[in-house]
Image (cartoon, rainbow, N blue to C red):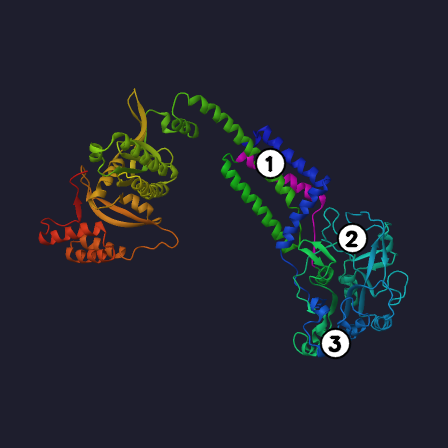
Amino acid sequence: MLARLAKQPRALTAICLGWMLGVTVLHIFLARYRNLEWKARDQLVRFGSRSELHPQIVFLAIDNASITLDLLMEDERKQSPALSLMENGFPYPRTVYPLIIERLVQAGARVVVFDMLFPSEKETDGPFREALAKYADQVVIGANLEARDQGAAGGHERLHHTLVPPATSLIPPVPGMDDRLGFVNFWGDPDDKVVRRALYRTTSEEMVGLPFRKAAPELFSLSARAVQKAGQLDRVPATHEMTLPRFAQQIRPHSLYEIFVRKFWDIPPYNGGELFRDKIVLIGPDGNWVKDELLTAFGLTTGPRLHISAMNAALKGDFLSEPSEWTNLLCIFAAGACAWLLGGLVQRRLLRLVILFGVAVSSYGAAQLLFNLQGFLPIVLSPLVALIGSSLTWTVREQVLDRVERLRMRRTLERYVSQDIVRELLDNPESYLNSIGGVRKEITVLFSDVRGFTSMTENADPHALVAQLNEYFEGMVATVFANQGTLDKFMGDAVMAHWGSIVGEGAEIDAVRAVTTALQMRTALARLNAAWKERGIVELQIGIGVSHGPAIVGNIGCEAKMEVSVIGDAVNLGSRLEGTTKQYHLDLCISETAAALVRESFIVRSVDLIVVKGKTKPVGVFTILEKRGPGVTEPAWLARHEEAVQFYRTGAFSAAEKAWRDVLEQAPTDGVAQVFIERCVELQKHPPEAEWTGVYEMKSK
């Protein structure tokens, strides 16, 4: 192996290095490519595990039902002052919000969070201002970091933002940030504007591009302020940098209006307000009416759901980590090195592609596991591009060079020998076709013959008969080629083909292809006969024999003319089986060895145990009823037929006759049953003199 690695082609090394450097340049300098990289990571997030929602979080949604109140009767709306105010639609009068705060705080809510902005003064602000002051330790409302001159710092838009607090009629201005406020902003990544990160803390100085100072007053996000008010400030990340929270599981919100409807309030899930005891209750717009949505890995997402994920991550410490840039580059070069090893050590291209696919899938699976189990968000796209790009480029280069060379050789050789032999010589240079001798192989042989063709030639028009025969051959040969068979020769009206001689994929596959060919010949002939009948041409009937066994394959002939052919017992038996079809009124007979190979693929029927002409050892004969498949079942009479065969072979002729007569009741035209009934009747009249073996001796071919 080390010697082979030392001899790696320079072209392979150049290709792998080229892809590694190219991907590195794209990763570092091209924003659109980084966008694609993050899209690939988003797939890990989308299909990966999401954080289970912390039990301390409850979401009250200002949804369609809370805006229209169309699920309530008129008298139900009038029974509650809050609902009477809410029925005017959204935005609600500000006198609604103190009623919401009072309702939730009295129910035991630890923190009431409004993911809403109140930038302008209203004449009705008094009750809301009083509620905010009364419950200052339990209420958080939104403020906005308004962009003045957007720039980028640390890869995220954070420069030149100014805090815009709510109206002074609600919260009077104070130095820094009132502890009832939290900024509602999320920033998308600069390459694609997708929100993946959350900022929990910052300072006014950082927001205008100045360096961080420990003494500077901190600005808290809405989610960070909610966690702080819940008494868990230590859970809020201390960093002033963006973090990657793991998204929370899909949360099913409760409609805001329901807390003012007694028939809902007194039953689960509210239970008289117990749902909210010691909880962080976030209130915000949600539903298909909301236009203020942000793009995330899960598509467009409303602000309240983002805040819930941020709060949830803080409470549970469920944050994602990502590799350093140096680690990313190392992964890219490791992928290129893997492609270099694959190209040098695995010479078979198909195997190399299979391994490549396995490595790529395994790499992605490992990345998904790292995300799910460790909260690690690795680089995904770039290593795969380096790996797959390098491997495929090298494989395509090999393939192109091979094709060019083969084409050159093929064009030269085809001037002197047939295309089939050229193909074998080029595809299998060590083949037995390169020697004058032969090789013994297990093959499957098919013989087909037209019934009564000799008598047809006596009176038929020669031109019409030849045209019909050519049309017949074209249909039959097409089925041979469609099933990867080798056409050996035409013998008058007979076709001889074989599988596994020149190219084979195993005995079972060869036998299945041969039998498939026989069934397709049957179908093709039916189509031809239908067309000939319409044209007034006599229809043809054929018999087909299929056998499997050892044969000698090689260049057979003389110095003047040689051809690739097969000889041996399997060939002779196939020819005899074709002739046997007439004896049993069948169009297809197959040998015992072939039947054993195709039983899983076809419905096989026993026919007889015979000694063919010129042989002394009996062979089993079978036929094929149908190809197995969905919805295909064995005929009801088949089991009875097989039982009759056993009776017959053990000498129970009366029982065999009765069984075959039962078969005829279900299949009145069955020729096999008719043949054996006649035999059984005769054998009962004239019992065999010698010991009965169940073997029938064929007197003719």
Q: Amino acid at mark 2?
A: Glu
The reply, left or right, for residue 230 in relation to residue 467 is: right
Image coordinates for residue 533, horizontal then vertical, percent: 29, 41
Q: Name the foreground residue: 201 vs 370.
A: 201
Q: Name the foreground residue: 598 vs 302.
A: 302
Q: Amino acid at mark 1?
A: Ser
Image coordinates for residue 23, horizontal then vertical, percent: 67, 38
| Residue in view at x 56 percent, y 44 percent | 359
Q: Which residue is mark 3?
A: 107
Q: Amino acid at mark 3?
A: Ala
Q: Which residue is mark 2?
A: 241
- Assign a secondary structure to mark 1: helix
Whether residue 239 is visible, yes or no, is: yes
Residue at the outermost top position: 560
Mark earlier in primary sequence (1, 3): 3
Whole-number angstrom distance, CA of label 3 to CA of label 2: 36 Å
The reply, left or right, for residue 647 in relation to residue 473 is: left
Could you tell me if the residues under marks 3 and 2 are in contact, i.e. CB atoms within 8 Å?
A: no
Whole-number angstrom distance, CA of label 1 to CA of label 3: 64 Å
The reply, left or right, for residue 390 in relation to residue 499 is: right
Per the rendered image, the range of residues in magenta is: 318-345
The answer to which image quadrant residue 588 occupies is top left
Label 1 Cα crowd, 10 Å radius (few <14 / some 14-19 / many 20+): many
- Assign a secondary structure to mark 2: loop
Could you tell me if the residues under marks 1 and 3 are in contact, i.e. CB atoms within 8 Å?
A: no
Q: Which residue is mark 1?
A: 390
Image coordinates for residue 15, horizontal then vertical, percent: 61, 32
Mark earlier in primary sequence (1, 2): 2
